[in-house]
Amino acid sequence: MGRRVTKIYKPGDQIHIAVTQNFEDIATEFFQFCKENHYNPSEVIRSNMEQWLQKQKRIKEMMEGSLERDAQEAIEREKRILERLREEGLS
């Protein structure tokens, strides 16, 4: 099968989102709030996308670091067990 190519976005490209049935009220309120308070909805969405992405990257790094520590601790624990078995003549 062919490999999917990641789209590279350029300034001016449009990003489209679908308003699902359970999101219609939020979308309506969001755009109305932005209009009434002179916010640029696109800027709000872009900045929140950036914040979300940075948060997800930090979470992923933390999880990967945790998995590495857990794996290292398991290896050390196994070494200690094997050493005790050797000392007791069971290995």
Image (spheres, grey):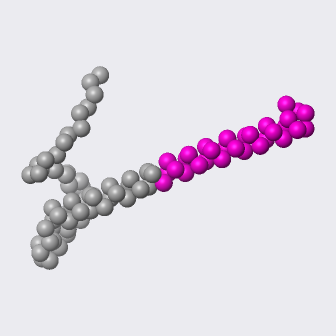
Q: Please state if 90 lies on the left or on the right of 49 as rendered.
A: right
- Give left or right: position of 82 versus 18: right
Q: Position of residue 68 (x, y in %)?
A: 56, 46
Q: Left or right: where does residue 53 sit relative to residue 60? A: left
- Give the residue at x 27% y 58%: 50
The reply to whether residue 25 is in sight is no
- Specify the farthest residue to the top: 1
Looking at the image, which residue is at 29% across and 22% down? 1
Identify the residue shown where x is 14% and y is 72%. Answer: 39
Residue 64 visible, this angle: yes
Q: In the image, is residue 74 part of the stretch drawn in magenta?
A: yes
Is residue 56 rendered to the left or right of residue 26? right
Nearest the camera: 43 or 74?
Answer: 74
Provide residue 36's location: percent of width, then percent of height. Answer: 12, 76
| Position of residue 11 measured from the top left corner of the image (x, y, whole percent) | 11, 51
Query: Which percent across, then down, holds residue 81?
Result: 79, 41
- For the view shown, which residue lies furthest in the left direction? 12
Magenta part of the chain: 62-91
Task: Single out the residue that lies furthest toward the right.
Answer: 89
Front residue of 31 and 25: 31
Q: Main secondary structure of the magenta part?
A: helix
